[in-house]
Image (tube, grey):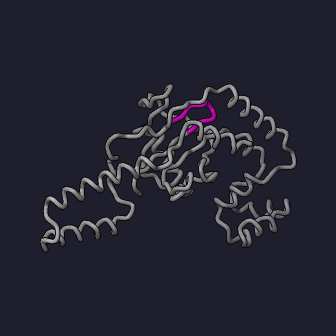
Amino acid sequence: MTEREILIANNRDQSKYRIVTGAETLGELQDAIARNEGVYKMVGQSWVSNPTPINISGLTFTEGITKTQLLQRDSALPTNVQFKGQTTNNLVMLLTNTTKQIRSGAYPTNRKDFGAYIKQNNLGEAIKQEFGDNWTRISTDKLLNFFANTPEKNTTSNKDAINEVREELKDQKKVKEVVNTPEKKLPDVKDAPHAATVEWFYDGIKKMTSDNLLYAEDVVVLADLTAELAARLIESKPKITASDMDDMLYSIRH
């Protein structure tokens, strides 16, 4: 996959990171983080090279824009997500310490145990209403997200966690700067998302120049115009701010 920017908010130490990667699954992303290649940490209002690898042991990965919880290494990272009215492949990964909740036996993570859990908790009809089909035909990732977001009978520990995060966010100073600092030059894009269309357009220009329908000067002007258009389109893309990341983190714990 084409490389994309993934922002990371670590609830354990309230740190924020940025990585550009072509990872398509949770496992590939975790491996990229472990290698600590191209990982930057937010210090104040600036990004600096991350000195030490992020400790992700015992942390659950949740994609903040789509609220998708990723619990298996082969879980596919979301693509073409909607953010502020536009489609983007950039993601926000929220790392939360949910080891205690998983160990408590709140819900199973092994599919072979799903049937008994669904029956014991009378979730069959709720799953049909949510997904429009029997649970046996629903993917593991979707079921795990459904289990994770289904309220438990004993919510005392959840309420304590909610209050704890709420206080942390109250005391935390919000970073006002936009996380994605706009670049004056165009980004270095290696692969076009619509490669076939780009190739068709480029071949058309070459054909028109060979038929003298366009001259070199026309191509220069065309290149200048498309570069200016590209810069405006990049500038108008929705930016994910540190405040957006904090709001996402709060919403999945609420």
Relative placement, left or right, of 109 versus 119 is: left
Q: Please check the rendered image and state whether residue 239 is part of the magenta-colored stretch, yes or no.
A: no
Percent x, y for residue 246?
62, 37
Q: Position of residue 104 (x, y in %)?
A: 77, 44
197 in relation to 146, above or below:
below
Q: Can you give x and y, in whole percent of width and height, for residue 175 in the image? A: 56, 30
205 w.r.t. 180: above or below = below
| Viewport quadrant of the C terminus | top right
| Residue that appears at 59% across and 50% down | 65
Check the image and report above or below for 141 versus 43.
below
Residue bounds of the magenta highlight: 9-17
Quarter location, residue 201: bottom left
Quarter residue 141 falls in = bottom right
Residue at point 35%, 53% (across, down):
230
Residue at (80, 62) in percent of width and height: 118
Asked whether 93 or 251 is in front, the reply is 251
**Which residue is more in the foreground, 110 or 162?**
162
Task: Determine the residue positioned at 65% across, 62% down.
Answer: 140
Quadrant occupied by the N terminus = bottom left
Front residue of this view, candidates 20 and 173: 173
Q: Answer with left or right where residue 152 lies relative to residue 245.
A: right
Q: How many marks?
A: 0
Q: Where is residue 187 in the image (x, y as percent from the top left)?
A: 34, 46
